[in-house]
Image (cartoon, rainbow, N blue to C red):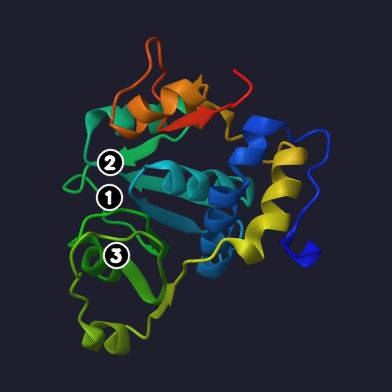
Amino acid sequence: MPVRALYSLPDAVDAVLGALVEPGGNALRAVHAAALAPGDRLLVLGPGTIGLLVAMFARAAGAEVHLVGRSARSREFARSLGFEGVWTADQVPCVPYDAVVDASNAPELPAVALDLVEPAKRVVYIGLAGTPSAVDSRIIALKDVTAVGLLSASPGLAGAIDAFAGRAVDPRPLVAATVGLAGVASVLAGERPPAAGSGPKIHVDPRL
C-alpha cells in the first residue's frame, strides 16, 4: 500500500475499534452527506452495522435519531444502544424528517426514503439491494430533494478514527463475538459462535 493510503491508529484505538474504522468511515460520510444540524431529525432505514453506526454518529452530532428495522431482534438491539425511536415500517411516526439514510438491503426502501423525507431536504443511499430499486425521479424534482449515493469509506476514515479514539462514538457493542482464524469458515457460513451477543458483527483475531 502507498504510505498516503495508510492511517496510524492511536493507542486508544485497539484491534476491535480498528476493525470497525472502515464501516465507521462509511457511516460518518453518510452523516456528513445528510448535512444535519443539532436538533435535526434523522430517520435511518436498516439497523445493521452501517445503519447503527450512522445512528451513533448522528446522535453524537446532536441529531434526534429514529430507526426502522424489520426483525424484532434488530429493533431490540437498537433500543439496547439507547435509541428510543425504533419502529417497524408501518409504525414510523408521521413527523418531519430532515434527512433519511437508507442503510438497508431492501429494494423497496429507497423509494420509501424519498417519500418520507421533508421537501428540500436530503436522502442518503448507502445500502445495496440484491435487485434493482425503483426511485421516481419526478418525486426528487418536485420535492426539491438532494439525493446522495455513497460507497467509499476513505474520506471518512480519519474522522472515524478520531471519534473512536475520543469515545464520541463507541461501536464495541456491535461486536457479538471474537473468533480466531479457525472459526472464520463457520462464521462465513452463517453460524454464530456459542455465547455470541446480539450485535451484528463477528470480530476475527488471528492471534487466537
Q: Secondary structure at mark 3?
A: helix
Mark before the other along the chain sequence, 3 or 2? 2
Asked which quadrant contains residue 112, the reply is: bottom left
Residue nearest the viewer, comparing 180 with 94 = 180
Residues packed near mark 2 inside 10 Å, few (<14), some (14 to 19) or many (20 plus): some
Mark before the other along the chain sequence, 2 or 1? 2
Q: Which residue is the extreme one toward the front? A: 182
Structural distance between the alpha carbons of marks 3 and 1: 14 Å
Q: Residue at x 28, y 27 (%)?
A: 73
Q: Are marks 2 and 1 in contact (CB under 8 Å)?
A: yes
Residue 131 visible somewhere in the drawing:
yes
Which residue is label 2 attached to? 87
Asked which quadrant contains residue 121, the reply is: bottom left
Q: Which mark is residue 93?
A: 1
What type is the residue that disc 3 sits on? Answer: Ala
**Image quadrant occupied by the N terminus:** bottom right
